[in-house]
Structures are given as structure tokens and as C-alpha cells.
Image: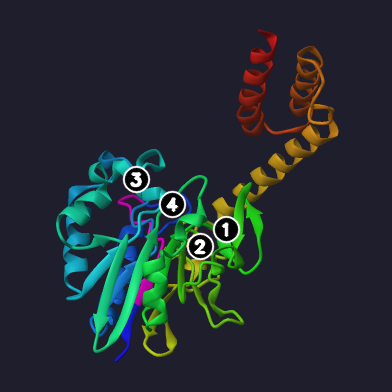
Amino acid sequence: MPIDIMYYTDVHLRDNPPPSRRDNYKESIFAKLEFMAEKARSCDLTLCGGDLFDLKPWNQNSYSMVIRLMKLLKSTGVDNYILDGNHDLLADRESSISGQPIGAIIESGAAQLVRSHLIEKDGTRLVLKGFPFAESPDFSLLQLTPEELEMKKNGVKFAVVIHQYFSQKAGSIHGTPIYSYDEVAQYGYDLYFFGHYHIDQGVYVNMDGQVFVNPGSLSRGGYGDDAITRIPRLVKVSVGETIDWEYFLVPCPPGEEIFDLELKGMEKKHNEEMDKFVSALKASTLSADLEADAGEIKEETDKVLQKIEEDMEPEIITMVKDYLQKASEVLDK
């Protein structure tokens, strides 16, 4: 019999709605989690790929919300595994878990952190590992030990859940690397789960038969990453002699009903203003000559400050002048 895993990721649970939402965001997230719990009751375990919570400080997460989540996870009746994402950690430190809301979930017994676990069912054996968020990830840590390689030869399947930007092709987003599946495929796991990237990329199988599960976020908190048009999905993954999967569309209203589209228009305008700012920087020699002396760089910085005052709206000016003024002051010393 296969081991059935109900996979979801990037829940971003919070008490107050993000600015982009005009509905009851918290209740919307709990409705999705209730749907997940219902589907999970016929599985062997649930697996969350990170960012269970949205806001890191305890004082921004109510005790009632955390306790409600504990009860919901326990209601699945199966083992619940959670990976720690960047939103679950204070300053991205693993040592901060005990003092975070996710630590309370773990301490209550409602779930356990994914590290390395041997899961067995009717002759099927699966090693499930976790690779928490790191600012500079060292994927060589995924290397299987000689003992694990021997287990693999004897039919044990290996799976890992990773909280980083991943896709079929490498790239970048907001200046942060997007790693390709090939980056970790070399370590020989049979099954890879990904969290952190909110876009739904579905399930991909490479030529070696390795399976990559990357369904995107359960939440829809911002305007980007296809959030307005996307319907979140759960993925039930069955691990036996083969690896199979099934999608479940999560019942939720369409994006145009829950997002403040007027605010979206304002955000778009601000982004266009920021693009103007970036163009102004590129047009200057501020970044053209890395060997320029501090005096020349300061002069160019002052020119950019003057230019944005002429071309941009006050809100954007305030934002960018702060950064450039600080740079100018540092160079003045």
C-alpha cells in the first residue's frame, strides 16, 4: 500500500488582513485549512512546505488564532509535518523556533518539524527530510550518506521538502535567485516538495523519473504571483512502487471579489514611478565605474536626488531620497 501525503504550503496565517485584501482574510485561510484537514483524513500524513504563519513576532499573532490552528491540525487524525519557512523564523534563525508561534504548534504536539523521518506502511518505506529556509542555502547538505544510499538500493524511497525559490529553469525574483530543479536533482532523491514560491508550477517529472511538487501558496495575500487569477491547490502524493499524485482545487472566491483592485492600480502607479527611479540611476554614472572615488560618487548621487525631485511624485521621492541621502552622508565622512 502506498504512503499518502497531503501537501500544502505557504499558508501565511495572520489575524489582520494584508492591505490588498478586503474580505475576512483569517477566516478565508481557516476555511482552506479545514478543507485540507478534511481531505487529509484519508491520508497517512500532512506536510506543510513552510510559512505557516505570516507575521513573525508573537505579539502580532493572537493566542486564540494559534490555539485554533493547533486544534485544526489535531483534527486531521494523522501525523502533521511542518517545515520552517522564512516567515516562521526570527531573523531567519532556526534557533528562534521555540520562541515563535510555530514553536507553540510543535510544543503542543499538533505537528512536528520536518528534519529526517522514516515512515513505513505495509512494506513501503519512505525517508522524509526537511531543508528549512536559509539566506544562503548550501544544497550539498542534501547529500545522502553511504548508509542512506544503501537503503535506497534496497527500495527505500527518499523525499525532501525545501523552502526556497525553485522552478524548472533558474532565474531571479526581486533580486533573489530562483534555483533550477537540476540544482538538487543531482542528490538522487525520488521526490522533492517545494515551498516559498507562490506561483503554482504543478508537478514536474524529469527524465530520471524524479518528481518535483511545487503547487504554490495556499494563501493569496498580494497582487503579484498570479494571485488574482489563481485558485490554490492541494496535492495528494502517493508513494509506493511508483509515485502518483492528485490535485484538489481549494474552494474559494475569485480574486476580483477579495482583492482591493483600486489599491492595485495605485500600487501599479507606484511601481512605475520606482521604475523611473531605477532608470535614473542607470542613466547616471553612479554604477558605471566601480573604481570612481567617493567624491565623484557623491556628486552623482546628488544629481540623482535632484533629478527625482523634478520627475517623480512626492511619495516616491520621500522613499528613495532616504536611501540616497544616507549613501551621500556616508560618502561625505
Identify whether 241 is placed above or below 228.
below
- Which residue is denoted by mark 3 in the rendering? 94
* Residue located at (55% from left, 72% from top): 201
| Measured Cα–Cα span from mark 1 to mark 3 | 28 Å
Specify whether residue 10 is painted magenta. Answer: yes
- Tell me the amino acid under the disc marked 1: Gly
Question: Can you tell which of label 4 and label 2 is closer to the viewer?
Answer: 4
Task: Give the SS element for disc 1.
Answer: loop
Q: Quadrant of residue 24?
A: bottom left
Q: Which residue is mark 1?
A: 224
Give the spatial CA distance, label 4 vs label 1: 21 Å
Instruction: Please tell me the numbered disc located at residue 133.
Output: 4
Amino acid under label 3?
Glu
What secondary structure is found at the residue carrying circle 2? loop
Task: State the image coordinates of residue 114 (x, y, percent, origin top left).
Answer: 31, 61
Foreground label between 3 and 2: 3
Which residue in the structure is indicated by mark 2? 198
The span picked out in magenta is 6-16
Residue 328 seen in this snapshot: yes
